[in-house]
Image (tube, grey):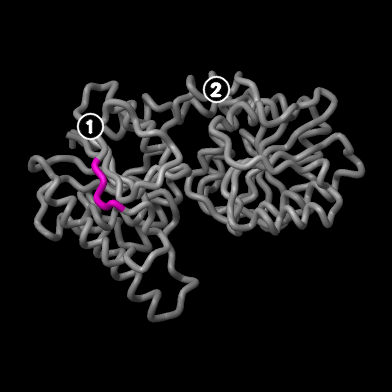
Amino acid sequence: MISVFINSLTSGGAEKVVLTLLERFRYYGNSLELILIEKERFYDLPKDIPANYLTDFESLEKGPLKMPYLFVCAYRLKKSIQQPGQIVQSHLLRASFINVIAKILGSRHHAQIVVHSRINFDHKSFYHRIIAKWIYTQVFNRADSIVSICEVMKRDLDVYLDLKNHPLHRTIYNPHNLKEIQEKAKMETPEFHFSKDKKYIISVGRIVKGKRIKDLITALSCIEKQNPNVELIILGDGDLRPELEQYVHDLALDEKIHFLGFQQNPFAYISKSDLMVLSSEWEGLPNILIEAMACGTAVVSSDCISGPREIINPKSDLNLHLENELEHGEFGILYPVGAVNLLAIAIKEIFNNDQLREKYIQKGLERVKDFDETKIAAQYLDIFKK
């Protein structure tokens, strides 16, 4: 039995990974179960796979019961384990803490943690940093196996949480159903009409501070007079959307920047765009870059911690982070986080050089084969065998 465990099925990259892994594990004939903490949902539940909810709450993410329910859910998880050695693969931190606490409470299952984002407390106060680091070190070292979704993240965790000697800490990339992505990319976009006379930049993700979407809006404002046919599509929603809509209005760019909210099929929009830009301050392994490549769209990304460089220029020094220049990687262009002027230059390079853009489209279609779900699922199953 393989139980795949996550906080909920709200919109997000980790949630998509869970659904992709469940489908692939099912293909190999495994007995499966989906475990969720909460009932909040953006994605549909997978058909014919039982869902086990550990609470009746819609969401505990911001409530006062979030911490106490770690232990309540751990006890409920322990009670739900059907057999010794059952695999419980957890995604995101709350689910992973519950997974390991259940073992501390006496459960005899195999607890696997999948780490989707960087863990670091150096920006916290001294005592907060010491306590948090100690707790995380204790929890992670009690997991039976750990998967980091990119190599930089694994190296960072090995040092920061003293996991260098953990017998089963591996790097496995996020899986992607490339065939499904490319089929959905061919569909229509009912919410938006693409004009053949214009060029489109697209941004996809939550509209929150860490995504630095304002940088992309500012970059467009820098180039729009010289490139009047360039427009920006923003897919997603979040706390900063009203503020950014006002910023767009103040720049008089309402006709050129389009906020379309969350879309069930973002691939149709990505494939019809000329350039995908990721402007984040930090990421894990950004699925959207891989998905854009699979859609046949060129990519430009900030060189943030930790995944963009590993996707776009994997043969480079993965510990390097740009400060004052662009980097033309093997599969796209990297720019320093927050460097709006350099982002504007990168966008103009892509739009003014059809040969460069076509090169990155073709190279991207080659690169995404490394993230195919069949290849990735086999790596997970190999860990389970061990």
The quadrant in which residue 293 appears is: top right
Residue 336: give x, y in percent of width and height.
67, 54
Measured Cα–Cα span from mark 1 to mark 2: 26 Å
Magenta span contains residue 181: no
Number of other residues with Cα within 10 Å of mark 2, as a class: few under 14, some 14 to 19, many 20 or more: some
Identity of the amino acid at label 2? Lys
Number of other residues with Cα within 10 Å of mark 1, as a class: few under 14, some 14 to 19, many 20 or more: some
Check the picture and name the quadrant holding the C terminus.
top left
Can you say whether 331 is above or below 183 in the image?
A: below
Magenta stretch, residue numbers: 52-56
Question: What residue is pinned by disc 2?
Answer: 184
- Give the SS element for disc 1: strand
Can you say whether 262 is above or below 129 in the image?
A: above
Residue 284: give x, y in percent of width and height.
48, 49
Q: Mark 1 and mark 2 in contact? Answer it, CB < 8 Å.
A: no
Identity of the amino acid at label 1? Leu
From this viewpoint, is residue 300 visible?
no
Question: What residue is pinned by disc 1?
Answer: 32
Residues 245 and 205: in front is 245
Residue 81: give x, y in percent of width and height.
13, 44
- Give the SS element for disc 2: helix
Residue 173: give x, y in percent of width and height.
41, 38
Residue at the right extreme, as displayed: 225
Q: Which residue is painted at 33% across and 56% down in the image? A: 94
Number of numbered labels in the structure image: 2
N-term mark: 1 or 2: 1
Q: Which residue is painted at 65% across and 53% down in the image? A: 241
Residues 367 and 138: in front is 138
Q: In the image, 272: left or right of 79?
A: right
